[in-house]
Structure formats: C-alpha cells, structure tokens
Image (tube, rainbow, N blue to C red):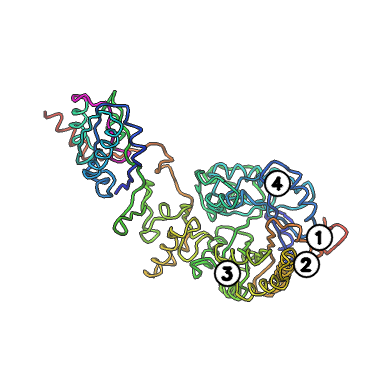
C-alpha cells in the first residue's frame, strides 16, 4: 500500500488558519491503514485545530469527513459537490498525494492542502513500522532477485549488487537500514539459486519509470466495456 | 594494447605495479593538484584521481587528471555512478580520452549522505543518479572502447582507448559472494582491479585463493589496496565503520603501544603512531606481495600524500620501472624523483 505520515500540526495549522470554513477529508484506504489519514486521524486533527483556534479566540468551522478512496471519481465526486455547495473555503486532505491531486482537479477555486507526507509503497513489517518495498519502476524484475527489490531496497538501486558498502547486513547509509542486496543474496542462498546472481544484469530501460515522464495505465477491456455501456445509455 | 597506458604496459610486461592516490581540493586551486603531483612524481606508476570522494564536492577528477599529466604523471581517473547518468558518463569518458587520459576506475561511489561528516556539511539533500551501476559502467566503457558503440546503440568512429579498472571489496559483507561479484566485473571487462584497504592479510589471502581458483587473476590484474594508518583512532574507525575493512587486534595493539610509549607527550605520541603506521604499511605491502595472484598494490595515503615517497622507498618499490619508446623497461632514478 501507499504509506504516508501525518504532517506536524503546526504546519497544518499554517495552511488553514486564514479560512473560516474548512473540510478535513480522510481517506478510507491506504492512509487509514498506516494510521496517517483515516477517520480517526481526521478526528484528531480536527480536535487539535479547534483547540488551537479557540485559544486564539477565532471562529473556524471545521467539517469532518472520510471517504472510501480519494483516488476514484465515484467517491470523490460527492465530497467535491459538498465542498462546492457548502461554501467550504479550503480542504485539508489526509489522503496521499494522489488524493490531493484528484480533489484539486475537481475543485476549481477551492484550495486543497496536503495533511500528510506521502512516503512510499511499503508493508507493515511490525506493528507501527512500515518499510519501502517497491519503487513502482514500471517493469518488474523481481524474478531475477528472489522477490526482493534492489531498486526500492538498495540505497543505490544497484542491479548487480551488493556494492562495497554492505556491513553486517546493513547499508552504508545507516545501521538502521537493511542492505537490500544482503537480503537478496541470503534469500537466493536459501533457495539454492545464488548462481543466478552471477549473471550480468544490463543497464535498465528507465523509460517505464518516472524518468519516462508522467505515466498512465490503460485497461482495454474495462475501457471498451465502459464505452459500450455509454453507447447503450 | 587496449589503451597503451603506462599501467597497462607495465602489467603486460609482468612488473609488480604500484598505484597511489591523489585527492583534488574542495576549491578550484589547480596549483594544489600540481604541487601534490610534483611531490608524488616517480613514486608510483599511476595515480588515482578521486571523483567527489565520500560525496564531497571537489575539483573534478577529469580536470585534475589533466593537470597531473602536465607534470608527467599518469592518472587513473575515477568515475562514479552517483553523480552522472549514462549520457554524462559516456560524454565524460569521451572527453577524458580526448584529453589523453588512459585509465579509468569505474565505481558506484559513496552515498551522498557520507558528505556530511565532522565539520563538513556536504550535500546530503542531493538527488543521486545511479542510472547504471559500477559493473554496468565497466560494460559501457568496454562497449565504447572495444565495440565502438554507445550504450544506446549508436556507433562511434574514434573509440576511447581507456584501460578499465574496477574496485573489489574482498572482505565485504556477504563475504562468500564477493569472489562472484569480482567475476562479474571481470566478465564485464575490468582489465585491472584495485581492492578495498587490506589489513587482515590472512582473510585477504583466503579470498584471493578463491579468485585464483576461479582463474580471475589471469583475466585481470588485481592490485591490493593499502590504506596508510595515521594513528590508533583511524584504525579503530576503519575497523568499526568502513564496510569491508577489518583490522586485526594485533595491529591495533601495536599502534596503541606506539602511542603509550610517548607517555603524556602528545606530539611524540602522534609522531610515534605515524612511524608505526608507516611500518605497518610497509609490512602489509611486503606481505600482500607474496600472495599468489596479486599483481601490484594501490597505496592510499588519504590527505597524507607526502608520506608516500618514504613508504614506497622503505617498501623496496623504488625506483619505478620506465617504459622507453622501444617498449623496453628498466628502473631509472634520474627521471623518477619521488619526493
């Protein structure tokens, strides 16, 4: 999932303090699971802002809402309507950066502020700890590296690792960071496929990654089905 | 000859070669580079010019390499993957070859977070590149030189004659994979290898045996890296914090004794340790020289270049052989000043 971390309240307050009526919009999917921007966090941020504004003797109306996903029109449209019709001056989205973008595109004259810092695609390795595991590079090579991603998990995204900076299974940048290539080598050893790592991996075509510009995915089946149904109606 | 560099010629002639290192300054003072060059001339066969070493901005390796050639030294230009994508890398390789540079060491480069250490701020917020890794860089350079083709597939008319070097951390973690990674570098086209600093000669000997059993020593020239220790603190730091460097307890004890022998005299303590450091270095050079498959040494005296002449002489590696126009080579002191 997409892992995010809530921004400090002081930063959030600075965004919204000049408005009289704001909406805090949570997201029921990724940011809920990583405890950054679900229904509960919407409540926490709203309460904190209310107290802060009260202390300053300012009247700000704060509306709370949390939708299933901020990245799909069927969920976003109703909340966009609510903003437009309800005289809301600013939105604080606790969805990931996708949610902020998607809401912004639907709200011509209303500012949407990010309430979280979107971090990475990762997994919960222990309660309260998430680790990056995929870089979304657009052309998966996990078959070569025993299912562990060198692009996301090596600090240098090296494809023919490990570099000389691996020590006691940790990366040269920090003793808190596992060496991705150490994980790969250990796993390949266990599986008896270490010799596969002796094969040279040539320079990658990064055009499938962000280097190729903003990307899109088209599912032809769904697209044609949708077009068909539109024709019928 | 692939490059016709002096380093290549000496290796081909079977000499035990010697490379050393010259770190460019953090400003544009080329005179500093020239001064170091004059000091080191004749002390080694070729001199590595580091490329923004430890993620610190320094006068470029390509420019410093050109500068030392003016003083008659042969450079080994270092090229990291951290700061350049494949366009910049190939462009710089072609530029280096056009300037007459004949050796290039292909390395990944320390992570940019290394630049913020001690009093230095570095650029830990920089975006790194790592478009290609060090082994891919070796392959790219080999493609330019031997196949006359850029990585993207476009042909080149004049090919860069560069002798291709790569680094090896024989005692890096996971240690059992290191010989295989060395093989990958050799397969990709590494003509010579400079290793990470060796202190634990026995462990290095074991890794070398594996490399020799794989026949790698015949396909590439392995130069053992020797980092000159200045004092006990440096040995301790390298043992605990530098990946792939393990310092035996006996060496630390020797350094500690050298320090203690000076009592409270701090100046004398540092002098004693410096002398012990050089003694250790000379011994290491002599020991690795006897290891089968080792074809030379790479001496790194980090910000301590002025000690290199003494080390080289005490290790019995002076004078260095000279290549004449006829291709003959013999040792001559007249042209080799060395300190």
Judge depth for marks 3 and 2 and give the one in front: 3
Q: How busy is the neighbourhood of tag 1: few (under 14 within 10 Å), some, or many (20 plus)?
A: many
- Compared to A209, does A133 lie above or below? below
> Disc 1 to disc 3, how far (Cα)?
35 Å
Which residue occupies 49% across, 70% down? B176
> Disc 4 to disc 3, how far (Cα)?
31 Å
Say which element carries label 1. Answer: strand
Q: Image quadrant for the C terminus of chain B?
A: bottom right
Count the labels in the image.
4
Pick the front one: A50 or B276: A50
Residues at marks 3 and 2 on the same chain = yes
CB under 8 Å between callouts 1 and 2?
no
Where residue B97 sits: x, y (%)? 67, 46
Which residue is the site of mark 1? B322
> Disc 3 to disc 2, how far (Cα)?
25 Å
Which residue is the site of mark 3? B246
């Amino acid at each position: 999932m997409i892992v995010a971390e809530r921004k400090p309240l002081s930063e959030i307050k600075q965004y919204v303090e000049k408005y009289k009526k704001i909406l805090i919009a949570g997201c029921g999917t990724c940011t809920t699971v990583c405890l950054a921007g679900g229904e509960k966090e919407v409540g926490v941020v709203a309460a904190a802002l209310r107290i802060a504004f009260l202390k300053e003797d300012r009247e700000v109306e704060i509306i709370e809402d949390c939708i299933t996903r901020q990245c799909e029109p069927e969920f976003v449209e109703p909340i966009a309507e609510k903003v437009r019709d309800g005289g809301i001056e600013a939105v604080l989205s606790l969805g990931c950066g996708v949610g902020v973008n998607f809401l912004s595109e639907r709200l011509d004259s209303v500012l949407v502020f990010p309430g979280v810092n979107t971090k990475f695609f990762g997994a919960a390795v222990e309660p309260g700890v998430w680790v990056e595991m995929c870089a979304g590079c657009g052309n998966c090579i996990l078959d070569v590296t025993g299912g562990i991603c060198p692009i996301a998990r090596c600090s240098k995204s090296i494809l023919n690792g490990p570099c000389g900076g691996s020590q006691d299974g940790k990366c040269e940048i920090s003793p808190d960071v596992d060496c991705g290539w150490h994980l790969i080598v250990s796993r390949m050893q266990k599986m008896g496929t270490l010799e596969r790592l002796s094969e040279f991996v040539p320079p990658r075509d990064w055009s499938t990654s962000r280097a190729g510009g903003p990307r899109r995915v088209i599912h032809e089946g769904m697209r044609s089905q949708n077009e068909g149904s539109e024709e019928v109606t | 000859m692939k490059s016709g560099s002096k380093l290549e010629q000496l290796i081909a002639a079977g000499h035990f070669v010697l490379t050393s290192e010259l770190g460019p300054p953090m400003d544009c003072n080329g005179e500093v580079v020239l001064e170091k060059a004059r000091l080191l001339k004749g002390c080694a066969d070729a001199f590595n010019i580091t490329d923004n070493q430890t993620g610190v901005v320094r006068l470029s390796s390509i420019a410093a390499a050109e500068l030392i050639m003016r003083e008659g030294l042969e450079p080994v230009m270092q090229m990291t993957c951290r700061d350049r994508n494949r366009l910049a890398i190939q462009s710089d390789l072609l530029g280096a070859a056009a300037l007459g540079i004949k050796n290039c060491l292909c390395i990944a480069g320390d992570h940019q977070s290394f630049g913020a250490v001690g009093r230095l701020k570095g650029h830990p917020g920089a975006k790194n590149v790592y478009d290609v890794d060090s082994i891919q860089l070796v392959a790219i350079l080999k493609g330019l030189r031997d196949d006359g083709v850029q990585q993207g597939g476009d042909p080149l008319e004049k090919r860069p004659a560069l002798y291709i070097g790569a680094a090896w951390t024989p005692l890096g973690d996971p240690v059992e994979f290191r010989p295989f990674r060395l093989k990958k570098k050799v397969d990709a086209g590494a003509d010579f290898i400079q290793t990470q600093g060796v202190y634990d000669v026995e462990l290095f000997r074991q890794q070398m045996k594996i490399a020799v059993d794989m026949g790698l020593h015949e396909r590439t020239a392995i130069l053992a890296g020797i980092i000159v220790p200045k004092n006990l603190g440096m040995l301790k730091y390298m043992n605990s914090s530098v990946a792939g460097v393990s310092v035996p307890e006996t060496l630390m004890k020797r350094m500690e004794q050298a320090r203690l022998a000076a009592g409270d005299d701090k100046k004398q303590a540092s002098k004693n340790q410096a002398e012990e450091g050089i003694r250790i270095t000379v011994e290491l050079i002599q020991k690795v020289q006897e290891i089968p498959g080792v074809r030379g040494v790479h001496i790194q005296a980090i910000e301590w270049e002025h000690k290199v002449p003494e080390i080289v002489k005490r290790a019995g590696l002076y004078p260095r052989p000279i290549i004449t126009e006829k291709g003959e080579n013999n040792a001559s002191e007249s042209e080799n000043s060395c300190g």
